[in-house]
Amino acid sequence: MKIISTMKGDVRIWGAALGLSLLAVGCESSKTSEHAIAVTPASTVLADGRGAVALSAAPANTNAVPRLFLPLEWSVSNPGLGRIESAAGTGAVYVGFGGRGANAITVRDQAKGEGVAVVYHGDATGGE
């Protein structure tokens, strides 16, 4: 009988240790999302590749204190397809020049928070 009660105690100790290690792993992943930025719209299509899109940024983590560290820095992955025409506060205007493809728009705040949106030129896959 003594062996069985000792085994139950060992199981409880190992179970508690496993639970604490999983809790520690979970805490680290939430740290990154505190600084994520949500861009609206997250994706859009310019049918002929030309036009303007109004973009806005907001904190993605609604469980944290919502805060962006201004000024925001907007950039595009393919300047041949379009550019950020203007930006102020939490908004920006993207202008497409035409052509086919996908242009990733990245926004960063001063605390290194980051968000991404995609403008598709042509269709939803960026092709013809």
Image (cartoon, rainbow, N blue to C red):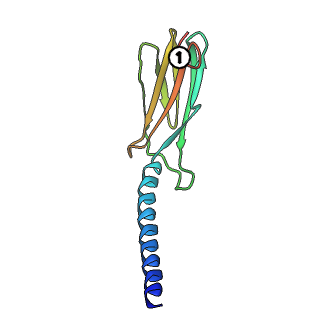
At 44% from the left and 45% from the top, the residue drawn is: 69
Q: Looking at the picture, tell me which residue is in the foreground, 126 or 55.
A: 126
Please provide percent x and percent y for residue 15: 46, 72
In the image, residue 96 above or below residue 17: above
For residue 93, side relative to residue 14 (left or right): right
Question: Where does label 1 land, which residue?
Answer: 126
At 52% from the left and 22% from the top, the residue drawn is: 94
At 48% from the left and 25% from the top, the residue drawn is: 86
In the image, residue 101 above or below residue 10: above
Label 1 environment density (alpha carbons within 10 Å; few <14, some 14–19, many ≥20): some
Please provide percent x and percent y for residue 17: 41, 71
Q: Looking at the picture, tell me which residue is in the foreground, 121 or 9.
A: 9
Query: Looking at the image, which residue sits at the far bottom?
Result: 2
In the image, residue 21 above or below residue 28: below
Helix, strand or loop for disc 1: loop
Q: Which quarter of the figure is the C terminus placed in?
A: top right
At 47% from the left and 27% from the top, the residue drawn is: 105
Q: Looking at the picture, tell me which residue is in the foreground, 125 or 10.
A: 10
Badge count: 1
Q: Looking at the picture, tell me which residue is in the foreground, 85 or 50.
A: 50
Please provide percent x and percent y for residue 127: 53, 13
In the image, residue 77 above or below residue 16: above
For residue 43, side relative to residue 75 (left or right): right
For residue 10, side relative to residue 38 (left or right): left
Kind of residue at disc 1: Gly
Please provide percent x and percent y for residue 85: 48, 21
